[in-house]
Amino acid sequence: SGSRLNLFNFYRAYVQAPENFEKILLPAMSTVVQVQEWGEDQLSPPLAAVRDRLMPMLYPEQAWQERFPEFIGTPWVGGLAILYVVDEHNAYWYVRRELLSHWGLEDEELHEIAVTNLQEYFERRPMELAAAGTEEETPSMFIPVRPDSYNASRLLSRDFVSNLRHALGGDVVIGVPGRDFFVGVSLKAEAIVHHVRDRVKEDFQRTDHPLTDRLLLLSADGVSELPDLSEA
């Protein structure tokens, strides 16, 4: 019916575990059937109906530009872009350029709404982090205890970035191989940073919703890409 189905993540999951073909396929097909039953109200809803469910979502910049240029997005750092989704609780769909025009919003207004909603999402679902380090020292590494579709998107929150830097005692190296997970390491822990760089590259190849195999740096200036000096 004119719909486009992205099988990229499905294929990656299948390659990693072909014996789980049916287990991987059924949830994806259930979502497709559900979407096919949507009417105009679901496909092009009024802004008031979805305003509090608009959320930012990190996505690989190259994949966005090549496959889904009709989705609203902004290039970010580390080969990533910021896209925007409407959260349907058990699924989400990306905001299209035509829909933004229908709502009468500018890109900057959409971003402001989405980031505000993201902050409110944090307040409803506080993140529990597992820390690594000795009891005598400031923790040197944090990872989320539970996967969440918006774990990586938390890096768009200035408050979250500031709190993470404070907890790790300065600048923080971040790995975001996939949508649901990140690892934060103190820049001072050079040996761990080297290990994390290798692990992020491995996880990027295996995860269902890959983001980037590059490392990011959280500093007082914001978020930037951490250069790989070993390749210099």
Image (spheres, rainbow, N blue to C red):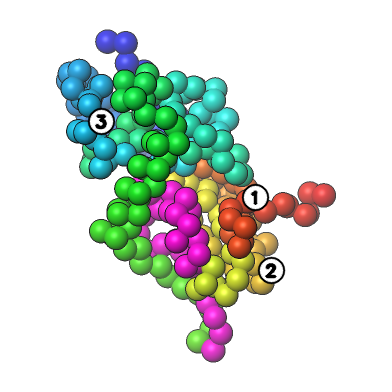
User: CB atoms at circles 2 and 1 under 8 Å apart?
Assistant: no
Asked whether, in this view, residue 153 is left or right of residue 212, the answer is left
Residue range corresponding to the magenta coloring: 136-164
Q: Counting residues from the N terminus, which is met first, the one under dot 3 or under dot 1? A: 3
Which kind of residue does numbered mark 2 sit on? Glu
Query: Is disc 1 surrounded by few (<14), some (14 to 19) or many (20+) residues within 10 Å?
Result: some
Q: How many marks?
A: 3
Identified at 54% across, 68% down, the residue is 165
Query: Is disc 2 surrounded by few (<14), some (14 to 19) or many (20+) residues within 10 Å?
Result: few
- Residue indicated by mark 3: 47
- Residue indicated by mark 1: 225
User: CB atoms at circles 3 and 1 under 8 Å apart?
Assistant: no
Residue 139, compared with residue 78, is above or below; it is: below
Residue 184, compared with residue 110, is above or below; it is: below
Identified at 33% across, 57% down, the residue is 122
Which kind of residue does numbered mark 1 sit on? Glu
Q: Is any atom of residue 138 visible in this view?
A: yes
- Residue indicated by mark 2: 190
Q: Nearer the viewer, mark 2 or mark 1?
A: 1
Q: Counting residues from the N terminus, which is met first, the one under dot 2 or under dot 1? A: 2
Q: Which mark is residue 94?
A: none
Looking at the rendered structure, the secondary structure element under dot 1 is strand
- Residue 88 magenta-drawn? no
Where residue 32 sits: x, y (%)?
Answer: 26, 25
Marks 3/1: CA–CA distance? 34 Å
Q: Counting residues from the N terminus, which is met first, the one under dot 2 or under dot 3? A: 3
- Residue 155 magenta-drawn? yes
Looking at the rendered structure, the secondary structure element under dot 2 is helix
In depth, the one of 221 and 14 nearer the eye is 221
Identified at 21% across, 33% down, the residue is 48
Looking at the rendered structure, the secondary structure element under dot 3 is helix
